[in-house]
Amino acid sequence: MNLSEKIINDIQSNPIMLYMKGTPTMPMCGFSNTVIQILNHYGVEYKATNILEDSEIRVNLSEYSKWPTIPQLFVNGKLIGGADIAVELHQSGQLFDILGQAGSSDKK
């Protein structure tokens, strides 16, 4: 499986998939940290991939998603967006519903 196939497989096989700089326990940028904090607020399970481990991940991911920035949050195989969109959806209450569609939302 090449890298592009792995990215597509991860997005399609994980209800909530986050591509970020760093890891959930050690985010390497404020935007990635913001999305982690939001996901943790909802207590959802998600898979995260650190794009800093391999520069080709970012290239292949952006080609697939047509979204240039990191982080990138996917729910049920659909790109939700980056940190700004996640914050906006969280503040409006819409993110709770979107995450609930992934079948793993337990509001804290």
Image (cartoon, rainbow, N blue to C red):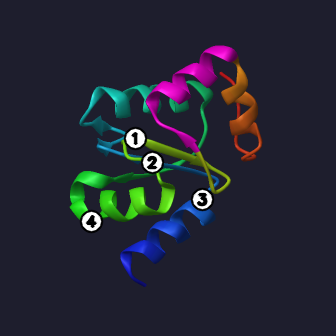
Which element type, helix, strand or loop, lies under badge 3?
Answer: loop
Tell me the residue at 77%/43% (across/down): 101
Q: Dot 1 corresponds to which residue?
A: 71
Furthest-bottom residue in this view: 1
Q: Is residue 20 left or right of residue 35?
A: left
Q: Which residues are magenta?
A: 80-92
Q: Dot 2 corresponds to which residue?
A: 67
Mark number displayed over residue 56: 4
Tell me the residue at 61%/15% (across/down): 91
Which element type, helix, strand or loop, lies under badge 4?
Answer: helix
* Marks 3/1: CA–CA distance: 16 Å
Measured as percent of width and height from the top left, residue 98 is found at 72, 36
* Marks 4/2: CA–CA distance: 15 Å
* Marks 2/3: CA–CA distance: 19 Å
Please determine whether, in this image, residue 16 is positioned above or below residue 34. Answer: below
Question: Which dot, 3 or 4, sits closer to the camera?
Answer: 4
Please determine whether, in this image, residue 50 is positioned above or below residue 70. Answer: below
Q: Is residue 59 left or right of residue 12?
A: left
Say whether marks 3 and 1 touch (CB < 8 Å): no
Tell me which amino acid carries mark 4: Glu
Tell me which amino acid carries mark 3: Asn
Question: Which dot, 1 or 2, sits closer to the camera?
Answer: 2
Dot 3, how many residues are within 10 Å of its Cα: few (below 14), some (14-19), or many (20+)?
some
Which of the pair 99/25 is nearer the observer? Answer: 99
Q: Is residue 90 magenta?
A: yes
Tell me which amino acid carries mark 1: Pro
Say whether marks 4 and 2 touch (CB < 8 Å): no
Which of the pair 2/45 is nearer the observer? Answer: 2
Q: Dot 3 corresponds to which residue?
A: 14
* Marks 1/4: CA–CA distance: 15 Å
Measured as percent of width and height from the top left, residue 20 is found at 36, 44
